[in-house]
Amino acid sequence: MHELGARRWESTDALTAETRRIVAATEAMMASTAHHLSEGIENLRLKAIVHELPDFLYVKDRDSRFVFANAVTASSLGLERADLITGKRDFDLFDFETARRHFDIEQQIMATGEARIDMEESYVLPGSRRPICRLTSKIPLRNDRGEIVGLIGVSRDITERKRQEDLHRGQASLLEMIARNEPLPMILEALVLMIEAQLDGIDGSVLLLDGEGTRLYHGASPNLPGGYSRLIDGVTIGPKVGSCGTAVWRGQTVIVEDVTIDPLWEDFRAMIAPFGFRSCWSTPIATSQNNVLGTFALYSREVRRPTEHEMTLVALATHIAGIAIERKRVDDRIHFMAHHDDLTGLPNRAFLKERLASILDQARRNNRKVTVAYIDLDNFKDINDGRGHAAGDEVLKETAARMANSVRASDMVVRLGGDEFLVVLVHQSSHDAGITRRLRDLQKAINRPIRGANGEITVTSSIGVAAFPFDGATSEELLANADRAMYRAKELGRNTLQHHDGGGTPVGMPLGEQEELHQAITGHQLFLQYQPQVDVATGRITGLEALVRWNHPAKGRVPPVNFIPLAEETGLIVPLGLWVLNEACRQARHWQEMGLAPLTIAVNVSAKQFADPDFATHVAEALERHRLQSRWLELEVTESVVMQNAERALAMMETLRGLGVRLSIDDFGSGYSSLAALKTFPFDRLKMDRSLVEALPGDKTAVAIASAVISLAQTLKLSVLAEGVETDAQMDFLRQAHCEEAQGFRFSKPVSPEEIPALLRARSL
């Protein structure tokens, strides 16, 4: 029996020589005392050695009950002494599925008499969350008559080895993904998951530094709460911007043991508190030349420092992430060079071919128009011949820049080659208002003299226009017809604009709606309605938002969505906004003269209004003209308005604050919202966007974001108003979240000025 057992153990190299000797001795001993297994091991010296073994060693009877186990086996199962395991079965120690799997294997071994050598087992031990991996061998135990009376098990913990194998496989898989040029978000997510699989209670995140080197954007965070990821997306780096923003600013690892007390998190504690994180360790991701590309961060819900093992994994992660991001940037650069003109940086014909087909397909599905303008510079050959090709190149670069600055972000300017360009105007509404003006403004921008080394150069252009779907259903048809219209423009004397209509007549796109809107502003067709803003705790009306409406003499009521974009496009938003400002101030003063309690009147301010250097003067004049105290006027601006030119916006806001006017940031939480805007600009109130409020309280992500926004705003001493409140459930959530004010159909739709007194009396009861 002893010799047979020794030969069996020679088949595995997983056990030490000493373990094999002990097992063989144990077999012999157990065989001699099998008739009374519970009496234990008599040899005290052997027993002491067995308990010192690092490997798991145990003996079970025919019913898979433990007869004996060494100390390390008992300890791994949460037992203080080895003798406490006697009489127990795996069903007493593991979950049912694990215990059943062990029992079935052991019963098969004892039924067949065949040993099972080097089995890999994986299960979760009591008190642990991560599976343990072991290499186990189980051998039937016989008495001196050859009868099987139990089994002997020997096992070695190979968890760390398996983790290392998983880590090596993960690294190989990531490098394959990089080599296959798979999308960067997929690679980064796989990287974060690989690191998280090696750690307990840790969530990982990758943030990418933008091209300007000022903001961090989402790269990958598969297990971070979505609400938190959205809040930090776009955060500005700096010397005191949490762990990640500071790590990029410093260019070195930042370890924060407790975000609730560390000064680096002072401005972000209210934001992170709802998500339960306590520690955050961030390491820059850098190129081989130490240029920072982003950060790799680990979050823990415990107050602690990272272990040496965790930092080793972070070093590995940042190295792989750096390779992936650099590869993506190189590929993007190659793609850019293949699809853009070297001289001007504009998209080229290859890019146009790829994009225009999809633009037309989208326009077809959404019943929208697309206009293409084929532009050829007049007599450009004379510039090259008379001034030289260097001067010609400067003209092309300056002209390209002017065209790019004259279109919207959704439009496209393409250099077709030589002195030929194409402008694609996309996402138009069904009417044509504004197209002619925009194209003529573009032509004027091209015509402005260009200052060169050898004096001024004046360039004119001939433009041919074709519109989808009227002038062509495909890219090829549109371009061909726009080209024909451009040659017709040259035939008519150059520096003209022609639209394709089959006969070559000049462009005559209607501008009727623009003229009608101008008449509406000057002809008393506009009027204001007011929507109440209420105190969440008491229901009392605290303010009113002024909302402009158009009563068209022929069409009746025109919704704001149908004329505000037209006003923005044509520049009529400035006189329209000035009319709204004065009318709101007049009405507010009129209510006060009626004996109503003063209320704050909120007026929306457009980007063009805010950019007007005289805007503060207009506000002061309106307040003085209507004898309204400035504290009863609130101006609402969106974040995009103030971020267009932060320095100029800050100066304007300081001037307005000097007048005593209140300022609020409107539509906060719609799309990208910058936390920096709340700290940089002197706002009094934050208006939470209706797109966020409407998801409350059923959407967990919306709940987390709304709670964080409210908490953060209050930390910055801003009041918070929720827009678009329509249900009692939304109101209950806002009350519990300590949101001060709300606005929406839950309280009242926008009403006429005449209805306000009755509404105020009803709300004061």
Image (cartoon, rainbow, N blue to C red):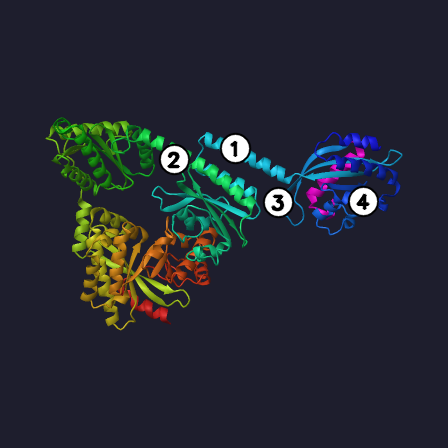
Label 4 neighbour load within 10 Å: few <14, some 14-19, many 20+: some
Q: Quadrant of the N terminus?
A: top right
Residue at 24 percent across and 62 percent down: it is: 584
Q: Marks 2 and 1: in contact by CB < 8 Å?
A: no
Write the residue at 42% across / 66% down: 537
Label 2 residue SS: helix
Q: Between residue 271 and residue 423, name the one nearer to us.
A: 271
In percent of the image, x 28 and y 67: which residue is there?
A: 631
Residue identifier under label 3: 130
- Labels 3, 2: front one: 2
Residue type at mark 4: give it.
Lys
> Which of pointers 4 and 2 indicates the residue nearer the eye?
4
Using the image, tell me which numbered label, if any, was put on residue 441.
Answer: none
Toward the viewer: 725 or 201?
201
Q: Amino acid at mark 2?
A: Arg
Closer mark to the observer between disc 1 and disc 4: 4
- Above or below, 744 against 326 in this view is below
Q: How busy is the neighbourhood of tag 2: few (under 14 within 10 Å), some, or many (20 plus)?
A: few
Check disc 1 and report the residue beneath it.
173
Q: Which residue is mark 4?
A: 47
Residue drawn 13% across the image and 38% down it? 449
Q: Tell me the magenta residue range.
A: 90-114
Label 4: which secondary element: helix
**Cα distance, mark 3 to mark 2?**
37 Å
Q: Which residue is mark 2?
A: 329
Disc nearer the start of the sequence (1/3): 3
The quadrant the C terminus occupies is: bottom left
